[in-house]
Each structure stands twice: as C-alpha cells, then as structure tokens.
Amino acid sequence: MNRDDKVAVVEELSSRLAHAKFAVVSDYRGLTVPVISQLRRDLKQSNAEIRVAKNTLLRRAIKGTPFEPMDQFLEGTTAVTFADGDPVAPAKVLVEFIKTNPKLEIKVAVLDGKLLTADDLKALSTLPGKDELRAQLLAVMLAVPTSFVRVLSAVPQKALYALQAIKDQKGQGDN
C-alpha cells in the first residue's frame, strides 16, 4: 500500500467516524471470508457497517474524534463496526453473531465518547430499539384517551341497560 492509498484510507475512515455515533472494535482472527460477509450483510440491515483496517491507519483516523479512547485497544487483527443511528440494533446483531461464531471477540465499544466493555455491549443489546421504544410510547399515549372514551361511553350504556331491564320487567308483569 503506497502513501497515497494510506492517506485515502485514513480520510475515508475519518469521514466515516465523523458521522458515526457508535463504534465497536473487535478481533476477527479465525473467521473466514464468507462468515465475515454474512456479518456485513446482517449489519447493513441494521444501518451499520464493519470495516477491517490497519491499526496505524485507524489510530490516525480517530485522532480528534469522540472515538479516540479506543486507541489503546487497537492491537492485533482489528475490525471496526460503525453505526450512525440507533446503537442497539448493531449491538444485537454482533451479540447474536458471537453466539454462533465465538471467534469474533469484542475488544471495546465507544458510544458518545464513552468506552463500553463487551459485557456493556451485551447489556446494550438487551434494550429495546428506537422503533420498539416509539411503539411503546405511542401505546402509552393512546391508552389515556382510549380509557377516557371508555369511561364516558359507560355512563349512557349503563343507563340504556337499566331502561332495557325496566322494559323487560314491565313486559313480564303484563303476562
């Protein structure tokens, strides 16, 4: 790799990190190309991307970014997963992937400039995603007006039942 290629890689990684909110550094030693390709496809569905990079180039790319704390973990074979949006979805993909492919080892994750361990990443993966949280919030917001309408409709409904019972009672008295 010549100097121009290295500069291009660093610039690409820097621009990718500038937009990312979440990154996971992992060791991919022992994984085959088809297995990593499957992980790439799974991560793409959760709006994330995994890149294999040289540690020296990655160190240059993270300088001055919120991901600078992960510098000390850039050793050995390194793959970095980036996510722009919801960090829960890629965390779930990685944790599920590790269950079937334990050779992928999470070194560290960075979320909003804070380091997360592999255990923290597992805990993050158990949280509901943004879409699930929005659905839960919507359900809570709809529950109050729905309950209010049920209470308001119960009063005339009970009055109607009482009138029907009186009518039925008078109809039996005529016999």
Image (tube, helix red, strand yellow):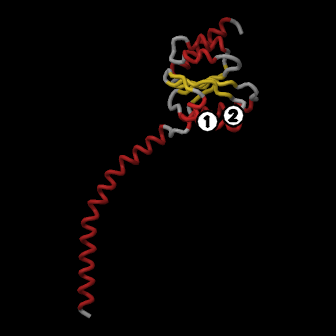
What amino acid is found at the position of numbered circle 2 in the picture? Gln
Q: Toward which corner of the image does residue 124 lie, by quadrant?
A: top right
Residues at discs 2 and 1 in contact (Cβ within 8 Å):
no
Q: Residue at x 28, y 64 (%)?
A: 154
101, 53: nearer the viewer: 101
Q: Which residue is mark 1?
A: 93
Q: Toward which corner of the image does residue 125 lie, by quadrant?
A: top right
| Residue 48: image location, x then y, percent | 58, 29
Q: Residue at x 63, y 18 (%)?
A: 73
Q: Rate crowding at label 2 as few (under 14), some (14 to 19) or many (20 or more) other CA atoms within 10 Å.
A: few
**Rendered-image quadrant of the N terminus:** top right
Q: Is residue 161 above or below residue 23?
A: below
- Circle on res. 43: none
Q: Is residue 113 left or right of residue 140?
A: right
Q: Residue at x 62, y 8 (%)?
A: 7
- Secondary structure, mark 2, is helix
What amino acid is found at the position of numbered circle 1 in the picture? Val
